[in-house]
């Protein structure tokens, strides 16, 4: 690396923390016996992105908000490097948030963040990639990171409209179930800025949060279907493959190449006309391989122009992940194709250990019943219907119930369409417990508000 004033210097890379292929690397490194954080920018855009990162980091520091110190800059044949002070023993606010279940604790975390945002906004600084993982707690202080997404505007202080848009973007990063916390934290932000809340302003703000979350959701799902930091994607004339990069291995690559061979050698879980499902054991994990079959030539002809059910399941699973609703975890997806025409397809997902709800639930397992009711409430809040809520589509895993069989799931834009579909979901769900009056009564009590809302009578 060429370092200004010192010529060529050497770094020892300890660990890659983030990788965006051919574009960016974030790593822990050692330089002159000290650990540093380095951001490496590659390719023809390297100088531009390094400049953006440097400018953003300095803008944060100028506001007085804590941020890792930029130590020096360097360059090499194909890129640029920024070296930052390394924060040891850090905990992201995202990690703190994941462990917090008390609303008071959650409001406390959000309040600390909006105080930082108010400070940035007062200095005309906007963080456009504003999520809890970009706030690190070290030695009792919160440090704001990711200067590449920071803009120093010409408006000092930032005006009310762009300020609230940026605040709404922050809330859009959270799961919809946490929207109940908006009221209190919004009031705190307005107090920090010295502004009065106008009539109807809170409702407008909540609508903006939902609009921005929808945009983020579509972007999130889009990334699951292309080559990026998290996913490895290959497109060929006869095949489409996508795989979680972290899960990729020689064994998984072989499974993706010849899934039928692994299905034949695995433990058959289902062998139907529409789908064949097998449990496959790799050296480091158990996976479920689901092949969506072509029943006959006419069925195949109907499917060639449509996205496969494997594609729909993959997309739906990651939509639920984005929304924080427990569902199966896909690892890879394959479509056999001839150009744009699709034929058979495969979904490879992690094996979920545990019985299904038809075998495991009883009225005394109150926590599990409440967890299932929470899933149904979350689906209602985001206008998603499952399409087949039989008991066997809830696996009772160690961490709680998980939904499977997602190819019939649908996110509705039209409220009336959703209400019809979700009413059918609730009816189908309650049919599971016809032979267990006590369990049916328990769910009736937990889901009473939903039944009333969607006109379900039992």
Image: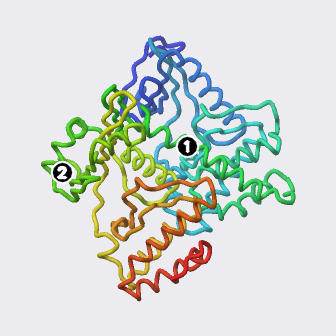
In front of the other: 23 or 355:
355
What residue would you read off at disc 1?
A: 218
Q: In screen coordinates, is 139 left or right of 330?
A: right
Note whether 159 is above or below 26 in the view shown.
below
Depicted 228 relative to depicted 298: above or below: above
| Nearer to me, 177 or 140 | 177
Q: Does dot 2 land on a helix, a strand or a loop?
A: strand
Judge whether residue 389 can be spotted in this image: yes
Q: Is residue 126 left or right of residue 313?
A: right
**Residue identified by numbered label 2:** 281
Between 405 and 361, which is closer to the camera in this rendering? 405
| Residue 139: image tag | none
Mark 1 burial class by Cα count in 10 Å: few <14, some 14-19, many 20+:
few
Gap between marks 2 and 1, in whole Å?
33 Å
Pointers 2 and 1 in contact (C-beta within 8 Å): no
* Residue 406 locus on image (x, y percent): 40, 55
Q: Position of residue 405 (x, y in %)?
A: 37, 58
Q: Residue at x 57, y 53 (%)?
A: 140
Q: Which residue is outermost to the front?
A: 298
The residue under the point 63% across, 50% down is 172
Residue 230 sits in quarter: top left
Left or right: 121 as drawn, with respect to 416: right
From the image, state whether disc 2 or disc 1 is nearer to you.
1
- What is the quadrant of residue 122 in the picture? top right
Which one is earlier in the sequence, the residue at label 2 or at label 1? Answer: 1
Secondary structure beneath dot 1 equals: helix
């Amino acid at each position: 690396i060429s370092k200004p004033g010192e010529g060529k210097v050497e770094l020892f890379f300890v660990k890659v923390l983030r990788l965006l292929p051919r574009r960016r690397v974030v790593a822990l490194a050692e330089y002159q016996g000290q650990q540093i954080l380095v951001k490496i920018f590659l390719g023809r855009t390297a100088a531009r992105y390094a400049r953006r990162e440097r400018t953003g980091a300095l803008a944060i520091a100028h506001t007085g908000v804590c941020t890792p110190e930029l130590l020096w800059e360097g360059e090499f044949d194909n890129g640029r490097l920024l070296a930052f002070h390394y924060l040891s023993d850090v905990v992201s606010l995202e990690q703190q948030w994941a462990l917090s279940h008390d609303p008071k604790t959650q409001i406390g975390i959000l309040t600390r963040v909006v105080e930082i945002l108010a400070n940035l906004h007062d200095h005309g600084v906007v963080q456009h990639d504003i999520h809890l993982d970009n706030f690190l707690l070290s030695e009792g202080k919160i440090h704001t990171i990711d200067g590449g997404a920071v803009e120093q505007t010409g408006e000092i202080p930032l005006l009310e409209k762009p300020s609230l848009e940026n605040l709404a973007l922050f809330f859009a990063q959270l799961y919809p179930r946490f929207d109940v916390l908006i009221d209190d934290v919004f009031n705190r932000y307005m107090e920090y800025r010295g502004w009065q809340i106008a009539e109807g302003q809170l409702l407008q703000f909540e609508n903006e949060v939902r609009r921005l979350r929808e945009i983020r959701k579509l972007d999130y799902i889009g990334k699951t279907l292309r080559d990026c930091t998290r996913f490895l994607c290959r497109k060929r004339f006869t095949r489409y493959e996508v795989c979680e990069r972290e899960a990729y291995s020689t064994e998984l690559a072989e499974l993706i190449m010849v899934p039928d061979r692994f299905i034949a050698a695995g433990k058959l879980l289902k062998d139907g006309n529409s789908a064949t499902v097998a449990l496959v054991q790799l050296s480091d994990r158990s996976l479920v391989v689901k092949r969506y079959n072509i029943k006959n030539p006419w069925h195949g002809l109907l499917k060639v122009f449509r996205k496969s059910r494997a594609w729909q399941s993959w997309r739906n699973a990651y939509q639920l992940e984005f929304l924080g609703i427990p569902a199966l975890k896909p690892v890879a997806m394959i479509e056999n194709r001839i150009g744009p025409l699709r034929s058979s397809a495969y979904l490879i997902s992690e094996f979920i250990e545990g019985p299904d709800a038809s075998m495991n639930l009883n009225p005394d397992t109150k926590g599990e019943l409440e967890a299932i009711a929470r899933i149904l409430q979350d689906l209602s809040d985001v206008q998603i219907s499952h399409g087949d809520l039989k008991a066997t589509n809830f696996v009772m895993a160690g961490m709680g119930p998980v939904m499977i069989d997602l190819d019939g799931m649908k996110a509705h834009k039209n409220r009336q369409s959703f209400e019809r579909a979700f009413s059918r979901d609730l009816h189908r769900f309650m049919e599971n417990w016809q032979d267990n009056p006590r369990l049916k009564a328990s769910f009736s009590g937990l889901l009473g508000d939903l039944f009333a809302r969607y006109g379900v009578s039992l």
